[in-house]
Amino acid sequence: MLPPDARIHRDEYPRQLGLKANFIDEYLMEQIESEENLSLLDPETLTLVLSCRDEGLRISEALTLKTDCLKKTPSGRWALIHYKSKDKSFRAIPASRVVVDAVRGQHRRVRERFGDSCRWLFAMVSGNPDGKYPAGDGPAQEPTHLTAQSQRRPTPPGPGHGQYSAHP
């Protein structure tokens, strides 16, 4: 039995049932999914957006994808292998044909820029001549949790049709 002056802290309450997700506003989602707007993105940013949108990756997970992140499953389908920073494990998820093609193109661009020694699909651009570090806030240990602070963000919708610019 608890004493009459016992206190229960908020973090001791049982978890509430139900979904408490922050969904993207439908107006914004329509812009993100618009082929017209996607065509405005450079190939690297498009690959990043598709990996997050179509495969459900967090930005930190997408930014630490390796160049060998595509694997064929025993059934012959493609899977995207990524590191889950939340529980520090690896996960394979089915990859759409669109994402497979985008990842292959990004891998080719990384090889052209950094050579075969770069293992990151999204290598940090400045101060990283050999592609040793993944994109993010600076040199990172592998695997790592990165933030999206240094990533370009779309400008808010302007007057007219609500289109956004891929480059602020």
Image (spheres, helix red, strand yellow):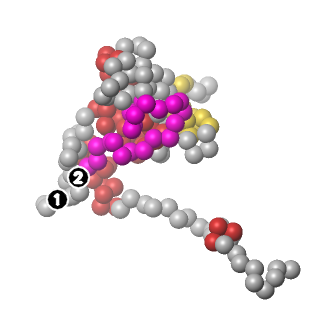
Q: Residues within 10 Å of mark 1 (few under 14, many from 20)?
A: few
Q: CB atoms at circles 1 and 2 under 8 Å apart?
A: yes
- Dot 2 crowding, Cα within 10 Å, few <14, some 14–19, many 20+: few
Residue 29 in the image: above or below residue 90: below
Mark toward the viewer: 1 or 2: 2
Q: Which residue is mark 1?
A: 158
Q: Position of residue 13 (x, y in %)?
A: 68, 71
Which residue was labeled with disc 2? 155
Q: Magenta region: which residues?
A: 134-154
Quick one: quadrant of the N terminus?
bottom right
Q: Main secondary structure of the magenta part?
A: loop
Q: Amino acid at mark 1?
A: Gly
- Secondary structure at badge 2 equals loop
- The residue drawn where x is 17% and y is 59% is 158
139 w.r.t. 10: above or below: above
Q: Answer above or below: position of 80 versus 29.
A: above
Q: Is residue 104 visible?
A: no
37, 130: nearer the viewer: 130
Q: The residue tagged with tag 1: helix, strand or loop?
A: loop
Q: Position of residue 150 (x, y in %)?
A: 33, 42
Q: What residue lies at 38% left-to-right and 28% top-to-bottom?
A: 123
Viewed as shown, does residue 64 lie left or right of 166?
right
Residue type, label 2: Thr
